[in-house]
Amino acid sequence: MLRMNQLNGFGANFRRFSAPPSGPVVTHRGTFTTSGSVNSITQTGVSIGAAAAGRLVVVTGHIVRAAAAQRTFSAVTFNGSGGTIHGQTGINDGVNEGVQVGIMSGVVATGTTVDIVVTWSGLLPAGLINVYTIDGLVSATPTETLTTTGNDPSVTTLDVAASGVVVGAFGGVEPSTGAFTLTGVTAVDDRQFGAGGTNMRAAAGHASGLSATSAYTVGCASSAGFEALVASSWA
């Protein structure tokens, strides 16, 4: 009887433990903003958790311009080392506002913090970044990156590997900048941001533990009439 009680007790305790997550682990590390007349954002000492071999730091970039045009992202560094801009796209309202979004990354295997600098092609009133880490990847190279723009745009053919993850960057301007409804990812940040009367809607989101497919959909919808998105998948 004593042996049975001990086993039962062990079983009760055992059921309290959860199985580890399947596939890479995505963690949102924060949202950081800049405004004024700026052509870059520098964020130092961003907490990225415990050091790990192959740890990938992913940045979504969102910038707004007071013109019927966009600036483009030109560079990203992590602790002074160059990263990769995987994809970017933008759209403008044809009058006085344009938005550009992008996804970029770099491997930072050591340390618990990282210094990030994202640069774009000219002065702008405002910009922001979202910072993620992805641990447990087989490869730091995205499986695929897709971009699109329009009114409530979406991509429908994103390649995703088994147990894969997806990160999306979203931006919008005019005629208003209400909250996004995202498809294919869960938002970690969604805000109106700008300066001097020039504003964008900016959002980032991710999904993980996905099944293999060549037809994953990522989309966004909002009261903004002009929207842009970039989506990248990893495994």
Image (cartoon, rainbow, N blue to C red):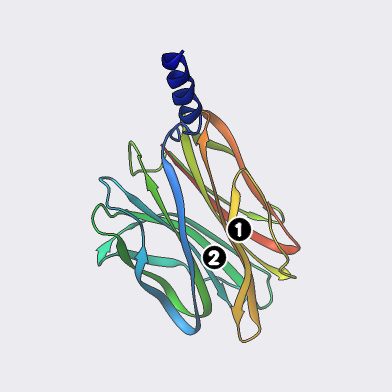
Q: In the drawing, what numbered circle is on residue 100?
A: 2
Q: In the drawing, what numbered circle is on residue 27?
A: none
Give the residue displayed 39% in from the left and 67% down from the top.
74
In the foreground, 231 or 226: 231
Residue 97 seen by the camera:
no
Q: Are marks 1 and 2 in contact (CB under 8 Å)?
A: yes
Give the residue displayed 27% in from the left and 48% down from the top.
52
Whole-percent x, y for residue 98 in the image: 60, 71
Q: Residues within 10 Å of mark 2 (few under 14, many from 20)?
A: many
Q: Does residue 121 sit above or below 91 in this rendering? A: below
Whole-percent x, y for residue 158 in the image: 54, 38
Q: CA distance from mark 1 to mark 2?
A: 7 Å
Amino acid residing under circle 2: Gln
Whole-percent x, y for residue 72 in the image: 47, 67
Q: Does residue 2 sit above or below 75 in this rendering? A: above
Q: Mark 1 = which residue? A: 228
